[in-house]
Amino acid sequence: MRAHLRRGWRYRANIAVRAVAGSLGAYLVAACFAAAAARTLPLPRLDAVVAATMLAFVVAPVAAIWAFLASGPLRALGGILAAAALLAAVAWAAGMPTS
């Protein structure tokens, strides 16, 4: 059998965890970033939401790329979840916009 066909379950799990972190995790980070940025940008509500959403389209691929650049699958998943938790905390601490 060829060497690339004999890859074990650890390699497949590594790629699976990174793919989940890079797809679902990037969506989670982008959504939390959009919420945090929309609540903290000093703009009218509609402008802040539009600007935050456009910036989130940059954050999502960066998070996905980082998931595959991390040194291990657990570090990738942990980093994505930590970034999402930090951004969610910022959004929660900022509260609802007033204008």
Image (tube, rainbow, N blue to C red):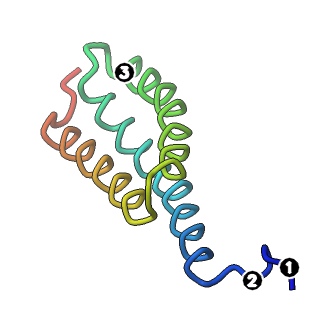
Q: CA distance from mark 2 to mark 3?
A: 51 Å
Identity of the residue drawn at 40% across and 61% down:
77
Chain-order first, disc 3 or disc 1: 1
Instruction: Give the labeled residue for mark 3.
Output: 48
Tell me the quarter of the image containing the N terminus. bottom right
Residue closest to the far top: 43
Where residue 81 appears, as percent x and y from the top left, is: 33, 56
Q: Amino acid at mark 2?
A: Arg
Q: Contact (CB < 8 A) between labels 2 and 1? A: yes
Instruction: Give the labeled residue for mark 2.
Output: 6
From this view, report whether residue 5 is shown above or below residue 93.
below
Q: Amino acid at mark 3?
A: Ala
Residue neighbourhood size for the residue with mark 2, other residues' Cα within 10 Å, grouped as few (<14), some (14–19), many (≥20): few
Residue neighbourhood size for the residue with mark 1, other residues' Cα within 10 Å, grouped as few (<14), some (14–19), many (≥20): few
Using the image, tell me which numbered label, if any, was put on residue 69.
none
From this view, report whether residue 51 is shown above or below residue 30.
above
